[in-house]
Amino acid sequence: MKEGNPRFSIIGLGKLGCSMAAAIAKRGFQVVGVDLVPDVVEKLNRGIAPVQETALQETIEAVMDRLRATLDTTDAILNTDLSFVIVPTPSDTRGAFSLQYAAWACREIGHALADKGEYHTVVLTSTVLPGSTRYGLLPVLEGASGKTCGVDFGLCYSPEFIALGSVIRDFLNPDFTLVGEYDEKSGSTLEDCYALITENKPPCKRMTIENAELTKIALNTFVTTKITYANMLAELCEKIPGGDVDIVTDAIGTDSRIGSNYLKGSLGYGGPCFPRDNAALSFLAQAVGVDAGLAETTDRINRTRVETILQRLEPYLKPGSTVAVLGLAYKPFSHSVEESQGIQMASILAARGFRVIGCDPRARTGAREVFRDKVMVLDDVSSSLAQADVVIITTPDPLFMTLRGKDFPRKDPPVVVMDCWRILRTELAESDHVTYLPLGIAEDECATAEAMADLWGKGVV
């Protein structure tokens, strides 16, 4: 590797790979991207973002003198010093992560390494389960190259902790970098590269490859457990007099042992990572004889969250009602609708015969592909609200946070607003023409008080 001026290749130009390539080039390094799809390569070489991601287009435009793409893996390997492999590892029927695409990429990299005289570091970034890199992919690299890991080339496992919608920012400013190393040289090489790439100079956690593989899915599944716990608290708060999940979680989150991140109480988690990581951890635990009950319960509860919320809304849904679902991406600032609970909610309501309108300017294309003709997807919020008898706000998108009472039509009976994130609590709580239902807040003081009296007031001396 050139001293102080490493060259990087990115194998796989999806949302993460393309964003990483642009981000590394932004930091002043030469980057070669590799993809199997000619259109992706052509677009990137023309300065056009082949995928949707925040700040990606402008970043690509600013780094065209340092970024190029190719269909040829050998070209990329021979002209760079370190390769990040970021290819799909889809869930298989067992809940594990398939190595099909990663193995193909490693075979191509191995063939290229056979023609290279210099040391090269290979870094797997795709999410995999413990043992996959060393026992599943390393033999492919050595077999295709005819070379020995630790002597002729280096190998690391190093996943990124990013969120769609903020990939470039998260990649350049992580809480920490995770390096699973085959040997000391491999780990030091990658750690040095991260020190040059990142903007915030985060700590680097170096460990064995297997520990790093476990750390990745362990971190994600811990976060999902925290989300699910907060959602349980939200349900409890709805059942006690004066219950308010924001008050409870604010206090709990102040404790340094817990922290406030992801402790909100709202809809369940979604997206391309969290749901499948729980399933994968459960598979791993069962495969090695460890009780996976916690991960399995977290997944089960999360999959029932939409129905739980719809049950609370049921008294307000009348035959022929029009329901507007604001928020179709799985989270704000994202185009992704994968495992989106807003999508699930709209689909269930449509299947039950309600007229459903979806609205999410960032995710409208993906949502229309999912819904086809079953749910109408509109481009602007005002048109959606104008037709609605019931409104469900599923993400705390800034676009929805600007809504005010005057934006909701005056109807008889009043429009019902289910606010899953309580973003309009100040604006709508006292509205005279909106029935406001904030998730995680006790709705019926008399009923909750009566329930508490029945629980504790009988037989007490």
Image (tube, rainbow, N blue to C red):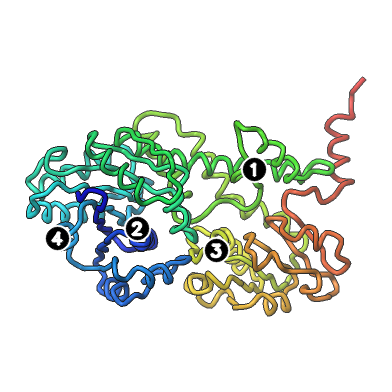
Compute the Cα span from label 4 to label 2. 20 Å
Residue 51 found in image quarter: bottom left
Q: Are marks 1 and 4 in contact (CB under 8 Å)?
A: no
Q: Earlier in the sequence, mark 3 or mark 2?
A: 2
On the image, the x and y values in percent for residue 337 come to 50, 64
Find residue 230 and name its label: 1
Q: SS of the residue at dot 1?
A: helix
**Residue name at image x 55 percent, y 40 percent:** 225
Q: Which residue is mark 4?
A: 74
Asked whether, in this view, residue 349 is left or right of residue 129, the answer is right
Q: CA distance from mark 3 to mark 1?
A: 22 Å
Disc 3 is placed on an element classified as loop
Judge the density around disc 4: few (<14), some (14-19), many (≥20) Cα neighbours within 10 Å.
some
Q: Identify residue for label 3.
A: 333
Q: CA distance from mark 2 to mark 1?
A: 36 Å
Q: Residue 207 or 118: which is nearer the viewer?
A: 118
Badge 3 density bin: few <14, some 14–19, many ≥20, Cα 10 Å: many
**Mark 1 vs mark 4: in front:** 4
The residue that mark 2 highlights is 24
| x then y, percent, for residue 404 | 77, 69
Alpha carbon of mark 1 to alpha carbon of mark 4: how far?
49 Å
Mark 3 against mark 1, which lies toward the viewer? 3
First in residue order: circle 2 vs circle 1: 2
> Which quadrant would residue 417 be assigned to in this image?
bottom right
